[in-house]
Amino acid sequence: MKVLYFAWLRERVGLAEEEVAPPAEVVTVADLARWLASQDEAHAHAFDNPAVVRAAIDRRHVKPDSAISGAREVAFFPPMTGG
Amino acid sequence: MFAVRIQREPFDAVAESAALAVGRTDVGAIVTFTGLCRADAGPDGAGLAALTLEHYPGMAEEEIERHVEEARHRWPLTGAIVVHRHGRLEPGDPIVFVATASSHRAAAFAAAEFLMDWLKTSAPFWKKEEPISAARSGGWVEAKASDDAAADRWRE
């Protein structure tokens, strides 16, 4: 699946997007964030405070306990500040 | 007419608003809101040279469209236009435009406020500040609890 990062998550990870293939035990959005954080220091820094990270699956807002099965695109970003 | 656009270019608020009444005689009220980049923002209120707006292409349009749909269910709107800019914007530059049209003013006022309140908290845009002083580092604008509270008012 494709993972996208925005704003300071993008800056911390150092990537706007990447293709990932998490293991089967990664079931929810929160699992995915933990698994990504375990990949390297940059990812760990991006996810060091999961409480302030929001997520979307296939361009819809989701909660951390949402299942990622079947997702084409999972995005992580800080709380929004548009308008 | 119902339309949502995300663009780098400036918008013409007068022309956008006028388009909501073209060719129809049932529009009794058009409410417009224009949000501008303010100079008094910035780290510690020290002054802002510019804001850079990042967005999630695709989701930004879809998320605003979902709220326009919800507004149409709540109020008898004859039209609505939302334009949100991205890229680098300087103080005084318009950032966002919302116009709502209805036969009567109450629906148009309420729907415009509803759309702006949701846009602030759920449309995937992020502002990064560029301070006037090079001595200060810019940073990502933090979300405000007051914006969440404004959007929460509309929950049933």
Image: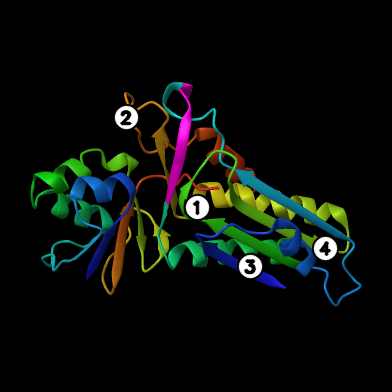
Quick one: B152 or B91, which is closer to the camera? B91
Q: Which residues are magenta?
A: B45-53
Instruction: Please say whether residue B156 is visible from this viewpoint.
Output: no
Horizontal side of B11 relative to A68 (left or right) equals right
Residue designated by label 2: B137
Q: What's the chain of the residue with tag 4?
A: B
How many numbered marks have been drawn onto this rendered protein structure?
4
In contact (CB < 8 Å): disc 3 and disc 4: no
Does B141 appear in magenta? no
* A65 vs B22: above or below: above
**Disc 1 residue type (three-letter):** Ser
- Mark 2 is surrounded, within 10 Å at the Cα level, by few (under 14), some (14 to 19) or many (20 or more) other residues, namely few
Q: Main secondary structure of the magenta part?
A: strand
Residue designated by label 1: B122
Which badge, 2 or 4, comes first in the chain's sequence? 4
Q: Nearer the viewer, mark 2 or mark 1?
A: 2
Q: Cα distance, mark 3 to mark 1?
A: 14 Å
Does B51 appear in magenta? yes
Q: Nearer the viewer, mark 3 or mark 2?
A: 2
Quick one: B35 or B79, which is closer to the camera? B35
